[in-house]
Image: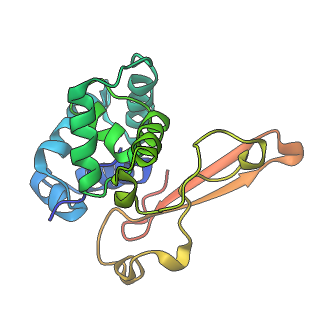
Amino acid sequence: MKKPYTHRAQEERYQIYAYKIAGSTNALIAQELDRDVSTIKRELSRNRGLRGYRPQQAHCLAQNRHQNKPKLIKMTQQMIARITTDLAQQWSPEQIQGRLLDDGLDAVCPNSIYYFIQKDKANGGGLYKNLRHKKYKRRAGSPGARGQICNRVSIEERPAIVDKKERIGDWEADTVIGKGHKGVLVTLSERVSKLNQ
């Protein structure tokens, strides 16, 4: 079963890049990353530069496309039906927005989806029951959240297959912050091929 769509994280773009360097086919990459082949083809064609597919450049292109999307989207009946269907599959509001964007459709922001869920709950609806976290708060920036890594996953929670070093595409990253916080160096190393970025 394919994973519910989420915006491909930069980590996954590095995995795609490593597989392509190793000469893997799109079908093999899709199988390894548990994605549809069409998703891999679309990623490679939409985020390609003059020197081919590069993960950092691909990530920037995708982010720019996302930022340049129109921001004010109305909750039409068609949008509500789509959101309701996706919530029934227990997709998060962030995943729903990502899938709408990937399908080339207008998308409301996750805050609007959370607001829609709260309104439904206040009217006696049960959409909130499809959220993975039943207690949720309004998604808004707060000074206390500054400098925090979003969606951070502890190293103890990584899949066991990563420790076996049997597949290409698992990257390790490290950062070095310069004196006075005036510079940052990021190093990336692919665990099997030892490719460094």
Is 187 rendered above or below residue 69? below
127 sits left or right of 39 in the view? right
Residue 44 in sight from this viewpoint: no
Q: Nearer the viewer, residue 112 or 44?
A: 112
Is 136 rendered above or below residue 66? below
Q: Residue at x 82, y 39 (%)?
A: 182
39 sits left or right of 54 in the view? left
Q: How is the image coloured?
A: rainbow
Is 105 rendered above or below residue 93? above
Q: Nearer the viewer, residue 53 or 132?
A: 132
Q: Residue at x 49, y 77 (%)?
A: 157
156 sits left or right of 132 in the view? right
Residue 179 in sight from this viewpoint: yes
* Quadrant assignment for the N terminus: bottom left
Q: Number of labelled discs?
A: 0
144 sits left or right of 106 in the view? right
Q: Residue furthest front?
A: 124
In the rendered image, residue 164, in percent from the top left (x then y), is placed at 36, 83
Q: Quadrant of residue 58?
A: top left
In the rendered image, residue 123, in percent from the top left (x then y), is placed at 41, 44
Is 165 rendered above or below residue 132? below
In the rendered image, residue 30, in percent from the top left (x then y), is placed at 17, 56
Q: Quadrant of residue 3?
A: bottom left
Q: Residue at x 72, y 42 (%)?
A: 142
Q: Quadrant of residue 108?
A: top left
Q: Nearer the viewer, residue 18 or 89?
A: 89
